[in-house]
Image (tube, grey):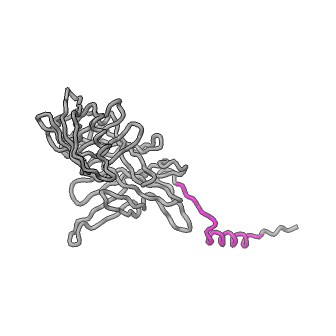
Amino acid sequence: MKRTIIIAPVISVALVLLVAGLFTIKIITSNDFTVDNVIGTVNTPLSATYTIENQKYSLEGGQVEKQLAPSSASVDRVSIFGNPIYGDFNNDGVLDAAVILAQNKGGSGTFYFAALSINIEGFYKGTNAIFLGDRITPKKIEVRNGRAVYIFLDRKITDSFMSKPTINKSVIVNLDSANMQISEIVQKQEIYTTPIKNNLNSKIWTWVKTQYNNGTVVEPKKPGLFTVKFNVDGSFSARTDCNSIGGGYKVVDNKITFLNTFSTLMYCDGSQEQEYTKMLGEASSYLINDKNNMIISLKMDSGTMIFK
């Protein structure tokens, strides 16, 4: 008895379903990146849009070029350095990607940035980028407890760019899923480095952010307005998004205390003045690190204020 095998109709039905979009073929590569291939349409972290210093860069195949000026031959090149590393950074059960972006604007410097690419329904959306350094040596990206850790070699602040990077550094990145923004988690072992200059009176300090040890980050809604200046006579003056603040300060070794704080009395709706003043009142110690940032530790080891 002969058996008849019907193949053509089955193949035809499968092709019809595939064209209709009912079948999705997922391709996962072992060491490069994960792609969704739906009838030839590919979306990967290599083709996402990232933001570097308020400028958007839409990558194709892991790189993009922009002309610096209409009449200039120089270009701004941004590319992904190495391969993306995968982890679930927004805790939705889907793998996202961590990347290192390398930027060159035609000069001798190559600037490296940390960024994430979040997988949203199969499409990768890039975040803002965090500056890692100029002409550093990236080593690797690790995923620890749902966060990306960027590990690289840098130089001492006193070294020239001709020197080989030899100082081990790492940056831990935290994702704000609601705003699709990333920020650096300040690590104590990296903040409390040997200072190259410890002069409070050297400049007017601008508040950048406050990192609490419970993971909360507070940043000024109006960057650049919150400052503090330490005078040699033991007084300080500060500016906020509303009033001016003044008073005295006392320093013993690296311990610092703000005294008899006062402010002008204008009311401003939505101001962060009270929050900023409260933080200064909780100061316990300070250090000016090798990046010339002032780090003020808060009482009870609750967090740190970062000034530049």
Question: Which quadrant holds the N terminus?
Answer: bottom right
Above or below: residue 286 compared with residue 66: above
The image quarter in which residue 186 lies: top left
Q: Return the x and y of residue 82 as percentages of the image width and height.
A: 38, 51
Q: Quadrant of residue 167?
A: top left
Residue name at image x 54 percent, y 55 percent: 28
Q: Which residues are magenta?
A: 6-28
Quadrant in which the C terminus is drawn: top left
Q: Is residue 290 visible?
A: no
Q: Nearer the viewer, residue 146 or 230?
A: 230
Look at the image and tell me whether residue 307 can be seen.
yes
Q: Is residue 57 magenta?
A: no
> Is 107 on the left or on the right of 31, as rendered?
left
Q: Position of residue 14 (x, y in %)?
A: 67, 69
> As rendered, which of 232 and 112 lies closer to the eye?
232
Residue furthest left in the image = 233
State the residue in front, 244 or 155.
Answer: 244
Instruction: Find the residue positioned furthest to the right.
Output: 1
Picture mark count: 0
Point out residue 155 in the picture as x, y percentages from the top left corner.
24, 41
Residue drawn at x 19%, y 29% as measured from the top left: 251
Q: Position of residue 299 (x, y in %)?
A: 32, 31
The image quarter in which residue 288 lies = top left
